[in-house]
Image (cartoon, grey):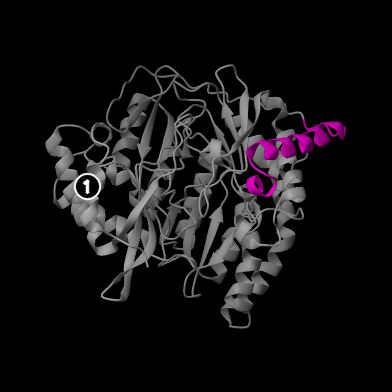
Amino acid sequence: MKTIDPQTWKQDLPEFRRQTEAFYSGELKMPAYKGFSGYYGSYAQKGGKASMLRLRMPAGRVTKEKLAFVSDAVRRYQVKRVHFTTCQTIQLHDLGIDAVCGIMEEALDAGIVTMGGGGDFPRNVMCSPLSGVEKDEYFDVLPWAEAAGAYLMNFIRAEKMPRKLKVGFSSSPKNLTHATYRDLGFAARPDGTFDVYSAGGLGNNPLFGVKVAEAVEPEKILYYVKAMWLTFRAYGNYENRGKARTRYMQEAVGGPEKYKEAYLEKLEEVFASGEDLTLQAEGQSISKEGNGSTASGRRILEQKQPGLYTVQWHPIGGQPAPEKLCALSDALQQIEGAEVRLAPDETAYIVNLTGDEAKQIEELTEDGAATLFEASVSCIGASICQVGVRDSQELLASCVKAVREAQIPDGALPQIHISGCPSSCGTHQTGAMGFRGGSRKVDGKAQPGFVFFVNGCERQGQETMGRELGTMLASDIPQFLVELGKVVAESGMDFDVWNRSDEVALERIAAPYLGEKD
């Protein structure tokens, strides 16, 4: 398999600095700069006074060495805002010219690539975060996800790519990476093979993927990746940016069955070409053993490796305090075999710990979410994002504050998903409850609001897009959640059981808060 040396991307970096300087001097307008900078994994933030940089972490895996680089960059460039994204990357925010250019170049020396992190390119390949250490997974899909990620870097400069190409691997029916409704998804089977799904996605006009193949040997997955590219080249609407996503091909070719036929035709072309894309990925080798110490707690998970543990850490809003992230990195440098796995819900999992080490890391990360609700998901929000409509981070912070003050018990509210705009970066369409930035008229004037979605589900075999109920004023949402949490708590049930016990109870409580969207 052909792979690209990260150092080869350095030849493009002088042009990035030149164009970035032109943008900040006012010579280059925002739309033109956005079209240029996405290739480098960077965008100007709202207001055009600072930049963000997206660090690819293939399969969500952050080794100790990569974390040490991030920590060092945060310290040297005095980075004040870090975000774990729902595509399992790390974003650095509020960067000046020297910081964004310097970190981008230095990251390549650490094996971290930013190219293709935005724009019309293959995005960070996603993977079940606990692949290889989780007890109930079908098999370890991490090596295959990493191999696919390396191969997809060959398509960064390819012609006629979709506006985004998101690829996900799932190791169990939990389907945390939404493998069954990505542009291309590989869902593990108990027999050690993959079912392959294609042309799905969230956002405007969301669609579940089409199952295009069953029981695919892992060694053959790159043939399916290349077939995805060829299918979009043949049938994708790359002239209309609003429809330049793979999910629009389902309708373009006449429906799911016709799409499957079109995809398999391109797959046959790949196999017939004679190009050898067969993989020989090496599985993870976790030689570390427990030392007899044990640990338990709400955030501590037992791994399938005897005597080893994982610690969950969910910074509120997926935004770790920079000093905490640096402290975690310092601690992990002294722990054999430890690494971080980023999850699609913005949780960080610290894996391969003995009992004693798990207790140490648990204490170090005690500033994170203390309940399921506090582990809610939010995109970076409109105060930072150019295209954001509403400040999702501000909404989440106000909701967490209200729920804490009301002393709503853990379990009475679900993990909610908040997106600042229809792009669904906060995956609002797949949560038990989701909110999407919008507006609502009050006395004839548009007011900040969020469209409310209910009963979405990501689990394989039960996939459901959340149903839109109406729009809540942003200022009313914390009060709504407190009222809901109190009702559920008084029932003695957790939210999921309560919600299933009465199909209209949630809508009944929400009704007084809802209105038509603007």
Horizontal and vertical percent for residue 86? 47, 47
**Of residues 484 and 146, the one drawn nearer to the viewer in this rendering:** 484
- Number of marks present in the image shown: 1
> Image quadrant for the C terminus?
bottom left
Q: Amino acid at mark 1?
A: Arg
> Is 153 situated left or right of 467 in this image?
right
Instruction: Evaluate whether residue 368 shows in this view.
Output: no
Q: For the view shown, which residue lies furthest in the front direction?
A: 254
Please, is residue 197 above or below residue 302 in the view?
A: below
Q: Which residue occupies the foreground of this view, 377 or 246?
A: 246
Q: Which residues are magenta?
A: 249-277
| Residue drawn at x 23%, y 60% as measured from the top left | 476
Task: Return the residue nearer the eye: 277 or 67.
Answer: 277
Q: Taking the image as drawn, is residue 413 in sight?
A: yes
Residue occupying the far left of the picture: 490
**Percent position of residue 137, x then y:** 48, 23
Disc 1 is placed on an element classified as helix
Left or right side of 163 for 374? left
SS assignment for the magenta stretch, majority: helix
Residue at image coords 21%, 53%: 480
Q: Quadrant of residue 225?
A: top right
Residue denoted by label 1:
508
Location of residue 465 with respect to 8 vertically, above or below? above
